[in-house]
Amino acid sequence: MINGNKVLFSGMQATGSLTIGNYLGAMKNWVALADEFECFYCVVDMHSITIRQDPAELRRRARKLLQIYIAAGLDPEKSCLYYQSHVSGHAELAWILNCFTYMGELNRMTQFKDKSAKHADNINAGLFDYPVLMAADILLFQADVVPVGVDQKQHLELTRTIAERFNNLYGDVFTVPEPYIGKVGAKIMSLQDPARKMSKSDENPNGSIYLLDDPDTVARKCRRAVTDSEGMIRYCAEQPGVSNLLDIYSACTGKTPQEAEKEFDGQGYGVLKDAVAESLNAILQPLQKRVAELEADKAYVDRIIRDNAEKAQYYSTKTLRKVQKKVGFPERPRIK
Ligand code: ATP
Ligand code: LTN
């Protein structure tokens, strides 16, 4: 609890360009929940270097991501929007939690298996340890709730296991967090291959719609989306491409997929695709305008970054000191 409120923590990697999957699956829920909780939204740049990055590009993307958090509707004066690398407690707690996590548990993580297959030339220890750093992110702030897309559920379960294991040994140190996975938009699929999740690191740019795509590109990508030869608009497992478009439309408009299915009953795929593009552009256009404004207001963004790093540092230190004491580290002398 912070100021009598429950705590929410979530984060995104500053790798690649954000897609509508990231927005509809996670960020949209962040905005919806922001008033109910004391919130921490992190740009997890330390997670990003588990895959090789160009340093200047990583710095640029990380700042852009923070601007997108604000542009998506998060109030940086209320919610704490900050860079993971600015708060030393993430790494310090991750080390301690490493000693309470088993190799076998990390070996089972599907994201590790996927990413190590994709980056076979760089299967580093950080990639293997990724979920422990993520657990540290969450537990450092004693988060009650963690809104993520469905692909992160396994990491959240491991976080709960680590927290419970630590609590069983040392008493009630950590809040055991609950995942929050939205009903619509929790898994947006690639427009080119509806069997695969839309991902910002996909090599085929036509499979993903990026948050910063212009309206014509959005329309073109929607029109090219893979459907089927059924010729009917139904929300069902046999029509994954069409169902994905209905999911996107529902997540953008607030309708249920069943309502959307009814709305397009008897229409052709072209009508559905144009409506999806329009519903997306209605969200993306104002977001892009706000990002451009923030880009121009360097002093404001710099102040937000400084103030929020301080706030995150303050709350994280509270948990960290408690944990360090529990495991037997000596009290720190005050060092100037
Ligand atoms: P990468 O391709 O680099 O692994 P990603 O696109 O999967 O990245 P992450 O940074 O891993 O994005 O995820 C950020 C958040 O967005 C997470 O909460 C994740 O669950 C959510 N998310 C990512 N892709 C989708 C998707 N296609 N549908 C719904 N949610 C998603
Ligand atoms: N692994 C997450 C990003 C992430 C995260 C977190 C999400 C890192 N730390 C803490 C929620 C809470 C992903 O989305 N790929």
Image (tube, rainbow, N blue to C red):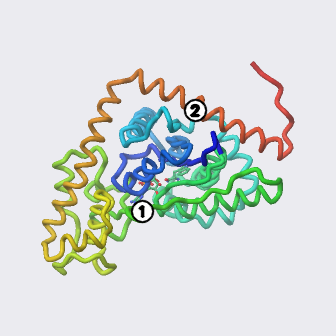
Q: Amino acid at mark 1?
A: Ala
Q: Position of residue 105 (x, y in %)?
A: 66, 64
| Residue 278 position by quadrant | bottom left
The relative height of residue 115 versus residue 230 in the rendered view (above or below) is above
Report the disc number at residue 56.
none
Q: Is residue 146 left or right of residue 71?
A: right
Give the SS element for disc 1.
loop
The relative height of residue 266 versus residue 33 in the rendered view (above or below) is below
Q: Amino acid at mark 2?
A: His
Q: How many marks?
A: 2
Q: Is residue 327 left or right of residue 185?
A: right
Q: Is residue 329 left or right of residue 66?
A: right
**Where does label 1 land, which residue?**
186
Q: What residue sits 14% from the left and 77% below the top?
A: 266
Q: Position of residue 51 (x, y in %)?
A: 50, 48
Give the SS element for disc 2.
helix
- The image quadrant in which ligand 1 is located: bottom left
Question: Callout 1: few (<14), some (14-19), or many (20+) C-alpha neighbours within 10 Å?
Answer: many
Question: Which is more foreground, mark 2 or mark 1?
Answer: 1
Q: What residue sits 30% from the left and 57% below the top?
A: 252
The relative height of residue 329 versus residue 20 in the rendered view (above or below) is above
Q: CA distance from mark 2 to mark 1?
A: 29 Å
**Where does label 2 land, which residue?**
86
**Mark 1 CB within 8 Å of ligand 1:** yes
Nearest to the observer: residue 197 or residue 247? 247
The relative height of residue 299 versus residue 276 in the rendered view (above or below) is above
Q: What residue sits 40% from the left and 37% below the top?
A: 70
Q: Position of residue 129 (x, y in %)?
A: 63, 53
Question: Callout 2: few (<14), some (14-19), or many (20+) C-alpha neighbours within 10 Å?
Answer: some
Q: Earlier in the sequence, mark 2 or mark 1?
A: 2
